[in-house]
Amino acid sequence: MKFFTAAVAAAAGLSAVGTIHAQSLPACSSVYTRKELLSLTPTEWSTVSGVLNAMQRNGWFAWFSYLHTQWFTQIHNQSQFFPFHRRFVYEWERVARLFNPAYVQPYWDEMRDYRAPATSPVLSSSWAGGNGQGTNRCVLNGVQAGWTMTYQSSHCLQRNFGNNGQPGPWYSPEYISSILQRSTTMDSFRSQIEYSLHGIVHINMGGDMATRASPNDWLFMLHHANIDRLWWQWQKAGHLWTMDGRNFDGNAMTLNTNIVYYNEPVRAVMQLGNGNMCYQYASDPVRRRSLLGNLEDLIESVLDLDDLKEWFPETAKGSNKPGLPAPAPAPAPAPTPVIAVANGRVIPYPKELPDSWVVSMGGDLDSAHRVRDDARKFVNAMKKAGYKSPI
């Protein structure tokens, strides 16, 4: 059974406590779908851009930047990270829908653009706009072109792409797939995502996105909708009610712990399509074929290599078909196979989070270094297997 495409029944495998919580969250009468940004229709994009301009005029960008700044240390580097940001993006979306009920928050699937992020259509003038220009690095195109932000002080919306305007590479879809499969606790999954894809997008977009007031840039909402989507994928794979690790106060994080600022229990945001979380994510964006499913087919073809079973344990389990006789003893190792992928390329090492930025954001250097080393080991394993990525 495919790890990314298998439907996980809401009640399957839940503890008694989890079942009680599931029953306490009524199913939504209707559910709207968050889509990848580039799959929006012209009408949908017109709705989104109109609402964003209205929210800027009415001070909402400043308000959400203020909240994120005020609570920054309580919502990063520990288990508030996923619940808070899910609730935060939902609150943004809820306010946006007061301006126009047709507004639905899109997401940016940054993994698709990991090799050369600056060339992403998302960062074109037709959508979110690109790098800042001039001495002040002001964003002059896209939906926020020429905006003046008011928090923390009056300034143009700024972006300053890393590596002199050519950030990247980021973290590959294959590596994020591996994190989804290997993480057995919420805290380990949180740390792996927070110090890989989450952090590198913030620092490499630069400007406002690299500060605690990052919600000044709408890229924040696109980015964190995608981070939320990845958490939901992990939840659906047998971790629906998994909440562990520590809270910002050092106490254990549980389903009954209140989400910072919102004074609501974590369990209130754990199940999409239930309670107030009346949204879902599109599973197959329009602009390209299903990404992770295709990669899984490729990866599965090299799972006879023990080192890749370590990186993709769920895919390895899925390749064991029930009811078949035990396989014959393995023959002597063959030469490392090269996976034939049209125009495939070796996965590059991802850029690292600068230690100075991790410290300035109140992060944990040991955690950041563990993720850095893990990502490098992953790339080495995929190179050894002869894997060539189509992305």
Image (cartoon, rainbow, N blue to C red):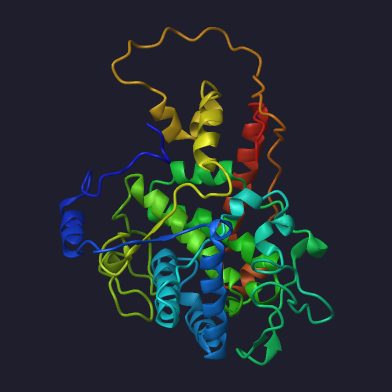
Q: Residue 389 lies in what quarter of the image? A: top right
Q: Which sits in the foreground, 364 or 389?
A: 389
* Image quadrant where residue 364 sits: bottom right
Q: Residue at x 51, y 34 (%)?
A: 296
In the image, taking residue 7 as reference, residue 11 lies left or right, namely left
The answer to whether residue 293 is visible is yes
Please state the total of marks drawn on the protein image: 0
Question: Is 63 left or right of 281, judged from the image as shown?
Answer: right
Q: Nearer the viewer, residue 200 or 355?
A: 200
User: Could you say which is closer to the camera, residue 343 or residue 80?
Assistant: 343
Q: Give coordinates of residue 132: x percent, y percent.
A: 76, 74
Classify the position of the N terminus by image quarter.
Answer: top left
Work out whether 387 lies above or below 47: above
Camera sees residue 311: no
Residue 59 in the image, given as x and y percentages of width and height: 53, 90
Tell me where residue 184 appears, x and y as whole percent: 39, 46
Residue pictured at 60% horizontal, 50% vertical: 111
Instruction: Give coordinates of residue 304: x percent, y percent.
Output: 52, 20
Q: State the quadrant of the C terminus.
A: top right
Q: Quadrant of residue 125?
A: bottom right
Up the image or down, 256 lies above or below 109; here it is below
* Residue at horizontal 72 percent and vertical 54 percent from the top: 168
| Residue sitting at the far front | 43
Q: Is residue 49 left or right of residue 139?
A: left
